[in-house]
Amino acid sequence: MNLNRTLAVLAVSAATVPALALAATPAFATANSPVTVSSQESQESQETQDRPTYAELQKTAADADAAYETAAAAKKDGLEKVRATLDSLDNDDTNPLRAAYLAAEKAAMAASADRAEADRAVTEAEAKLAGASEDDKAAAEQELADARTAAQQAADAERDAKDALDEADTAVDDARVAATREYGVLIKAEKDAAERKKSAHDALAAAKECVRTDKLTVLADGLPQKVVAGGTTTLTLTVDNATDRTLTVAPLVQFHLADTPYDERYLTAEWSRDGSDWKELDFQQTSHPTTIESMKPGTSADLRLRLTFAKDTPASKAFGLLAGDASDAYNPCVLGPMKRYDFSVLTAGSDAGKPGEAEPGTVSDDDRPEPGTTPQGTTSDKPVTAGEGAGDTTGDLASTGSSGTTTTLALAGGAVVLGAGAVIVARRRRGTTG
């Protein structure tokens, strides 16, 4: 799954902290909840359903690649063929068309020589007639007439021979044109295949672009504004799919101490589907605890989270970052808005009183860096990058809707500060559950 949010989350971190990472586990069940769909949403849903799926786009691109390779190979073979044909027409005396041309050329030359000889005979007969006596005049006239008849026959033969030569020459030229035309067809076929390949890959690339929707949310219920070190806070993370799409959702969850670097020393986090079988979270793994397969429109799912701060945790500000990273049949990257929850950690033995519930704010897109870049304000010498598999938007994901690889967030370990453009917007409070 191409979860670009994994990288973007660092832009809103307020201190040097490794992310609270949630290891991937099997999917958990979702529960139905009603959702109202407007006519515009219905139209958009129909337009989405009319689009080719991501798997279909992948197949189209693969088919276009294969078709282009075939066309390119045919063009290459065609070039060799046309070269061989032209060379044979020009140089191979055994080529039937060239042999016919050579024979016609030889016959035309012989016919021209015969006509020239016949014309000389006419000239000689005319001279002989002019000098003939009265007794020889009749014979000279007959000789001239015979010479002229022979000359006419020679001229006709020469004309026929030249016509035959022209026909043979035309046949050779036609063969040349046919060979080059056939190659031209192959050139056009390769060009068309290249254009189809580009179009297919452009469509695939467009589908890979992350689609943002405010209708995919991950919100926290039961997170107080103040927690006391040495105690445990249990809260519920609710994933809501209010889109018109069936999504495969990987909730993104991170918690940090804002004032204390390397907060894994102080913070222990566990998660559970239903409040039992708690699993400890590994700070070095991904921040996506699980994958919710085939989450239909209008459904929600809950995840329980348990945060324990060590007794020696210093007084500190803290915050959590929640978002929904998803995919569907049409896009491998569907992102919901990231929510930020600010709260305080009091020293052990403090009286937290009756704190209200922490409310979510929205992190501005302006403070989300491009993948593979170091967020503004970091003191790290290394860029923040996604680990192996983080950029995978192909393969099984497109056809099954599930992540084929585990996304790994590699932290550089430097200070990350909140960007100047970040805006924390208060949202309505949600009821506490459990």
Image (tube, rainbow, N blue to C red):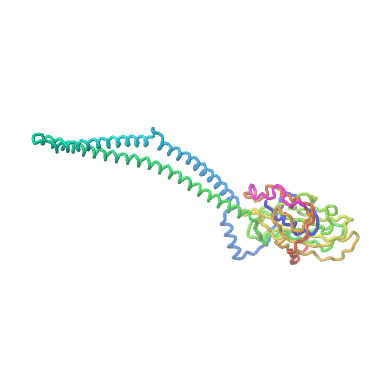
Over which residues does the magenta segment extend?
381-396
Main SS, magenta residues: loop
Magenta span contains residue 94: no
Task: Determine the image quadrant of residue 13.
Answer: bottom right
> Is residue 371 shown left or right of residue 153?
right
Considering every residue shown, the one lying at the far top of the view is 94
> Is residue 240 shown left or right of residue 232?
left
Q: Nearer the viewer, residue 142 or 234?
A: 142
Q: Nearer the viewer, residue 347 or 4?
A: 4
Q: Is residue 421 visible?
A: yes
Q: Is residue 112 above or below residue 359?
A: above
Q: Nearer the viewer, residue 130 or 235?
A: 130
> Is residue 267 shown left or right of residue 242?
right
**Residue drawn where x is 52% and y is 44% of the image:** 72
Q: Nearer the viewer, residue 69 or 377?
A: 377
Task: Determine the image quadrant of residue 309.
Answer: bottom right
Q: Position of residue 248 (x, y in %)?
A: 67, 53
Magenta span contains residue 388: yes
Q: Position of residue 51 (x, y in %)?
A: 57, 56
Q: Position of residue 373 (x, y in %)?
A: 71, 54
Q: Is residue 238 above or below residue 61?
A: below
Q: How many marks?
A: 0
Task: Determine the image quadrant of residue 224.
Answer: bottom right
Say which quadrant the C terminus sits in. bottom right
Q: Is residue 277 visible?
A: no
